[in-house]
Amino acid sequence: MNVDLTVSFQPIFLLGKRRRQVGAEYLVRGKGGFSNPLTLFNWAKSFGKLKQADINCCFTCAEAASRYNGMVFINIFSCTLAELLEHAKDIFIFVPPERLVFEISEQDALRNLDMIHRAVAAWKAMGVRFAIDDIASGYDRIAALVELEPAFIKLDGALTRNCHINQTRQIVIKHLVKMARELHVDIIAEMIETIDEYDALKKLGVKYGQGFLLCKPKQAE
């Protein structure tokens, strides 16, 4: 199963009067009918090759990010983390551990929470950090996820969209920010598309952000 892959990246910024790029999320897309990553990974899963495909995508992103000096965020399936440990030294050739951040989606992490604790601890012992992606709401779920002690929590676009005019979303974000500060976790807001959303998130105490307002995804060289 050979699929040609392309890599794009979307910068992540420190929100403030002088916003500054601090990292980038690297994203893999397949050519042809595999432009949607879910299509690509579902296809690989149908052949029993999900972990292999995930590892290949991780290496592809790491190699594409080798010249970048900021934090490098790479999406990974939780079921791949343990097997990927065997390739850690090879990945660090491209991205040193202190700059590498693995992103795990909220739902994926919850499904495999008991299984991944040891693998997460092993990666963190080498200096790699973790981000929990697609956080929307649900304190019981968030409480379980923070047992992984991530460095970052990424707010889903469902929360950030129109947050400047939605009081309920503002309340949820405000409490998430408060909780994150107490846990020494930084929050990254995704899908910031308007200056009003940007100003509201900044006012609510969100530290980092990404989205079309700040910078659209770019093709990696």
Image (tube, rainbow, N blue to C red):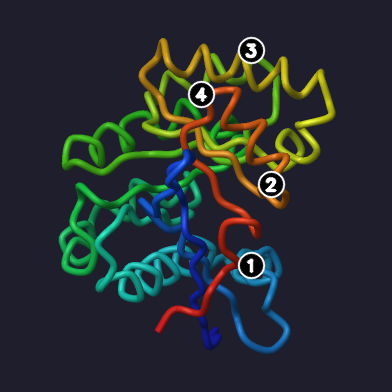
Left or right of 55? Residue 174 is right
**Mark before the other along the chain sequence, 1 or 3:** 1
User: Residue at left 64%, top 67%?
Assistant: 37
Q: Which residue is mark 1?
A: 37
Q: Helix, strand or loop at disc 1?
A: helix
**Mark before the other along the chain sequence, 1 or 2:** 1
Q: Helix, strand or loop at disc 2?
A: helix
Mark in the foreground, 1 or 2: 2
**Mark before the other along the chain sequence, 3 or 2:** 3
Residue 195, which numbered label? 2
Mark in the foreground, 4 or 2: 2
Left or right of 198? Residue 65 is left
User: Residue at left 34%, top 46%?
Assistant: 82
Seen from the viewer's position, the closer of residues 199 and 128 is 199
Residue 67, which numbered label? none
In whole angstroms, how far apart are the C-alphas of marks 1 and 2?
29 Å
Q: Is residue 111 above or below residue 59?
A: above
**Mark before the other along the chain sequence, 4 or 2:** 4
**Mark before the other along the chain sequence, 4 or 1:** 1
Looking at this rendering, what residue extends furthest in the front direction? 17
- Indicate the amino acid at tag 3: Asp
Q: Are marks 1 and 2 in contact (CB under 8 Å)?
A: no
- Indicate the amino acid at tag 1: Pro
